[in-house]
């Protein structure tokens, strides 16, 4: 029986695949937008087209579920017992120093020695062990080799400097500041696969912006994961930000839309929207995310940042993630989290090189203050010092 | 974008096709490719090194003695080596003589500990046990709340109190004893392997509850860091096994190889989704088979069994091989397959589907167009599409909102497939028909829209040969009792 199933499935799928591919061949430009305009209904609830029947969303209850009463938590006027960390912002180097041993070891032999085969091998090992990836490593070393030949370098230290320069050139030169809209409210959207640190980053950003004197509205766009809204709610409490939540299992774009409207109504500057973790391979969920972004742009607010939250431990899959997420929401940058661990986050080199998406922020811990702006010099220095 | 590991092996193997002997430099070339492929699959560098060295040793040695089919020999060795790393001993779970059986969950932040604590509780419950979950993560906001919510979903109680993680764990154990719970699952906070303080905390939790099983929860997307993380947790906690999570994505899962190799403990469970029933025992042979480009045939069969009825599939397949498969049948099959999920997803599970097809842009909405075309045909046309002439074509096109050209294309491809199938039917595959097993019928999930990206649209090169190769192999696979074929029987796409 099994063999029959496989044969039948194989034949039909391949045939169908062939047909569909051919038919699409002549068409231009990917997916047809089936998006009707969003019309806010009474009660400020965004009503979106229900997903087409053949595309049920996995994470969602029946599509016509409309967000129930949003709870808007008014923060107390006085700052709650926020454990505001008044310490100076953490620097890469301080945090990375304990995690860096392996990388440093790999390159220790280079210093004070001549450029030879083993020196090149050391570089390769160092880059590969940092998750830079085979292709990006080859490309980097190719560039370094050209310079070394051209300048007739012979010393290991020089070799290292050339590599650093190459890496800086690839990582630097991007504007890492987070943009705000000319007219409030500004909307920042956090997206990414499961468990990378989206909610935490939303909390950290809220902390940063409220500390800077801005009024912040958090949007609990994760209506799926257990206690996701509670988690963000605790960050709202900690940071004194407002929060808009929807019903569990509700439409995330409606929640985000409501949060933006609520922010506009009470004169909030900034909406930070958390979203549910989703694997980039789940097309229905990626489509849902695209919708969140489009809907967020329709109302009173403007989405100026769509940030991919990327776990520094992520391997080569990170590049595919960036590619798929940018296709869904047009990423403006990457937040590289958990860089306080032993992982190096080298995949961002490939992401910047291939997709031109810059790292804007770095997560260096679980506390509110553990978020710093990305700095290419420090990143590279910290990796090599 | 880099190729998948299977694609890479496909490329290597097809290049080796037809070569009589494998010289030492051939072996080196293959091994270089395998090294790159493994690195791109996130296998940790040291593990790649030992793996490649072992394969090389065997490949060169064996070749001298018997130069039968060198390409197959190397592949056999690679395959066996992968199985050796991933499989070996399997995870065996026995219950403590003095209940409760205690399971401790540990891992990096966000790896999936809390979710999989609940999945495991559900799994134990399904085996007639009475689990209790302990929320010992007092660090992350709403972590206990998350566990409680999950506990409600599966009707398993959760114990926690706002004190200190070690105290909570100890009190949880006490609570389990008092309330007659026979399995205790302890969820802990995520922690970095280099965080000495928190690593010490989890060690103290472990001391307090004396776990029978300590499981490391590892994200399948993890890169090179998997090795140092696994080493550190193993050094602190003496792991018994690993739960590999987020396998529902497209990460190659090389981390599994790394962890398995450095910790030497089995991967016990596979977590394949956010829902609590997306959880199963880990099948090393499946992962190894996938790595070798054999497709995930076993998962495919499982899915198919959910939507197909045995007799119906048999009848369709019989017609298929005898060349009596009509467009009517095709329409029906298409609808069945749609129940199994998006087409591109299924394609990914098929062994050796040419990567041009696998990566090509497949939009499931287009399936609707094909269906519409067939629906606009008369029964006679469906049974014998060759009768479709210009005027019929025009009518069908109008009826289905397509163009006459689309109709020609459909008919042409369909006839091609029919011819091919007939050829295969004669090629001795029919004996498989007699071998049948009862299928279960369950409703599968509906398919979502999928837009795969990628390569040029050049589908179906040499499909007959491909199909033939797979059929032989698939039959072998199942006759070996659900396991992969023994390495001796291993044939790969396009190999002599
Ligand atoms: N060490 C460290 N941990 C972090 C960092 N950022 C987030 N985390 C932790 O990572 C874990 C997951 O973070 P979340 O913010 O819940 O991740 P998420 O992306 O919202 O997860 P889902 O919503 O479940 O997909 C939590 O334990 C966080 O405390 C960081 O920069 N460093
Ligand atoms: N797609 C997918 N998501 C998963 C899987 N396992 C867990 N997740 C998701 O991954 C995210 C993190 O899972 P958690 O269980 O909160 O992870 P954790 O290790 O407890 O996180 P911390 O306690 O913050 O360290 C959640 O969004 C889960 O739904 C899986 O197998 N597949
Ligand atoms: Mg979250
Ligand atoms: Mg947890």
Image (cartoon, coloured by chain):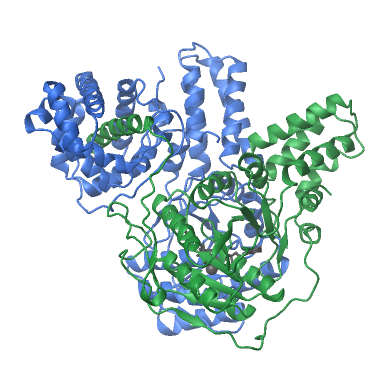
Chain colours: A green, B blue
In the image, residue A260 lies at what x, y percent?
51, 70
* Residue shown at 78% from the left, 76% from the top: A86
Let me know if residue A181 appears in the view. Answer: yes
Q: Residue furthest front?
A: A183
Q: Nearer the viewer, residue B164 or A216?
A: A216
Q: Image height check: is A363 above or below B220?
A: below
Query: How many numbered marks have been drawn onto this rendered protein structure?
Result: 0
* Residue shown at 54% from the left, 83% from the top: B171
Q: Residue furthest left?
A: B380
Q: Image height check: is B250 above or below A147?
A: below
Q: Is residue A71 left or right of residue B476?
A: right
Q: Is residue B236 left or right of residue A154?
A: left
* Residue shown at 24% from the left, 28% from the top: B410
Q: Residue furthest top?
A: B20
In the image, residue B494 lies at what x, y percent?
40, 21
Q: Is residue A169 left or right of residue A292?
A: right
In the image, residue A351 lies at what x, y percent?
63, 44
Q: Quadrant of the N terminus of chain A?
A: top left
Let me know if residue B213 appears in the view. Answer: no
In the image, residue A196 lies at what x, y percent?
57, 59
Q: Image height check: is B387 above or below B148?
A: above
Q: Nearer the viewer, residue A121 or B172?
A: A121
- Figure quadrant of residue A131: top right
* Residue shown at 48% from the left, 67% from the top: A221
Q: Nearer the viewer, residue B473 or A373?
A: A373
């Amino acid at each position: 029986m099994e063999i029959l199933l496989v044969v039948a499935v194989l034949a039909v799928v391949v045939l169908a695949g062939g047909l569909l591919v051919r038919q699409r061949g002549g068409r231009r430009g990917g997916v047809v937008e089936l998006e009707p305009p969003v019309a806010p209904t009474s009660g400020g609830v965004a009503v979106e087209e229900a997903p087409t029947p053949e595309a049920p969303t996995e994470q969602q209850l029946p599509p016509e579920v409309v967000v129930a009463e949003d709870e808007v938590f008014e923060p107390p006027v006085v700052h709650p017992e926020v454990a505001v960390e008044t310490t100076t912002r953490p620097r890469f180097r301080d945090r990375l120093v304990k995690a860096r041993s392996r990388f440093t070891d790999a390159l220790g032999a280079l210093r004070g020695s001549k450029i030879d085969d083993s020196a090149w091998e050391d570089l390769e090992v160092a880059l590969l062990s940092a998750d830079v990836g085979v292709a990006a490593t080859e490309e980097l070393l190719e560039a370094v080799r050209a310079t070394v030949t051209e300048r007739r370098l012979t010393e290991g230290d020089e070799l290292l400097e050339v590599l650093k320069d190459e890496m800086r050139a690839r990582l630097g030169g991007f504007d890492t500041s987070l943009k705000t809209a000319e007219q409030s409210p500004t909307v920042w959207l956090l997206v990414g696969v499961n468990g990378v640190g989206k909610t935490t980053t939303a909390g950290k950003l809220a902390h940063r912006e409220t500390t800077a004197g801005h009024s912040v509205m958090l949007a609990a766009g994760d209506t799926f994961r257990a206690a996701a809204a509670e988690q963000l709610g605790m960050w709202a409490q900690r940071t004194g930000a407002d929060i808009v939540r929807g019903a569990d299992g509700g439409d995330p774009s409606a929640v985000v839309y409501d949060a933006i409207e609520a922010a506009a109504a009470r004169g909030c500057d900034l909406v930070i929207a958390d979203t549910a973790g989703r694997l980039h391979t789940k097309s229905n969920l990626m489509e849902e995310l695209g919708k969140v972004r489009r809907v967020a742009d329709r109302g009173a607010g403007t989405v100026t940042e769509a940030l991919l939250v990327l776990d520094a431990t992520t391997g080569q899959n990170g590049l595919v993630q960036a590619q798929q997420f940018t296709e869904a929401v047009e990423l403006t940058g990457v937040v590289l989290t958990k860089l306080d661990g032993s992982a190096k986050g080298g995949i961002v080199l490939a992401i910047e090189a291939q997709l031109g998406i810059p790292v804007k922020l770095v997560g260096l811990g679980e506390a509110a203050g553990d978020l710093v702006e990305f700095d290419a010099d420090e990143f590279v220095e910290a990796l090599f010092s | 974008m880099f190729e998948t590991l299977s694609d890479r092996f496909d490329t290597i193997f097809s290049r080796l096709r037809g070569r009589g002997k494998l010289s030492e430099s051939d072996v080196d070339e293959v091994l270089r490719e395998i090294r790159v492929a493994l690195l791109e699959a996130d296998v940790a560098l040291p593990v790649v090194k030992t793996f490649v060295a072992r394969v090389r040793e065997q490949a060169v040695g064996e070749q001298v003695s018997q130069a039968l089919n060198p390409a197959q020999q190397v592949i056999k060795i690679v395959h066996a080596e992968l199985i050796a790393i991933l499989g070996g001993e399997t995870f065996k779970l026995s219950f403590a003589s003095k209940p409760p059986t205690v399971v401790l969950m540990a891992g990096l932040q966000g790896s999936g500990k809390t979710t999989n604590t609940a999945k495991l509780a559900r799994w134990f419950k399904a085996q007639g046990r009475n689990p209790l979950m302990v929320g010992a993560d007092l660090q992350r906001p709403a972590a206990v709340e998350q566990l409680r919510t999950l506990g409600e979903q599966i009707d398993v109680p959760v114990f926690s109190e706002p004190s200190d993680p070690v105290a909570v764990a100890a009190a949880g154990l006490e609570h389990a004893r008092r309330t007659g719970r026979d399995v205790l699952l302890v969820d802990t906070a995520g922690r970095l392997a280099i965080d000495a303080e928190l690593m010490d905390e989890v060690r103290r939790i472990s001391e307090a509850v004396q776990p029978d099983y300590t499981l490391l929860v590892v994200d399948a997307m993890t890169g090179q860091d998997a090795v140092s993380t696994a080493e550190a947790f193993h050094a602190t906690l003496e792991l018994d096994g690993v739960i590999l999570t987020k396998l529902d994505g497209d990460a190659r899962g090389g981390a599994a190889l790394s962890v398995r190799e450095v910790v030497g403990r089995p991967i016990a469970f596979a977590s394949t989704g956010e829902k609590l029933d997306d959880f199963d025992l880990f099948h090393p042979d499946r992962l190894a088979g996938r790595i070798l480009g054999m497709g995930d045939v076993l998962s495919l069969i499982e899915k198919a069994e959910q939507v197909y009825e045995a007799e119906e599939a048999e009848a369709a397949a019989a017609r298929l091989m005898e060349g009596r498969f009509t467009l009517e049948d095709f329409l029906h099959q298409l609808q069945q397959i749609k129940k199994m999920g998006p087409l591109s997803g299924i394609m990914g599970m098929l062994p050796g589907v040419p990567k041009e097809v696998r990566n090509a842009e497949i939009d499931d909405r287009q399936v609707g167009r094909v269906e519409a075309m067939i629906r606009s045909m008369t029964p006679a046309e469906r049974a014998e599409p060759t009768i479709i002439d210009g005027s019929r074509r025009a009518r069908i096109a109008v009826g289905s909102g397509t163009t006459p050209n689309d109709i020609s294309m459909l008919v042409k491809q369909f006839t091609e497939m029919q011819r091919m199938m007939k050829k295969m039917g004669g090629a001795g595959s029919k004996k498989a028909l007699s071998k049948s097993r009862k299928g279960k019928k369950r409703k599968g999930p509906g398919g979502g829209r999928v837009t795969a990206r990628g390569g040029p649209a050049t589908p179906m090169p040499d499909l007959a040969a491909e199909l033939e190769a797979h059929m032989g192999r698939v039959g072998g696979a199942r006759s070996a009792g659900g396991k992969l074929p023994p390495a001796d029987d291993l044939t790969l796409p396009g190999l002599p």
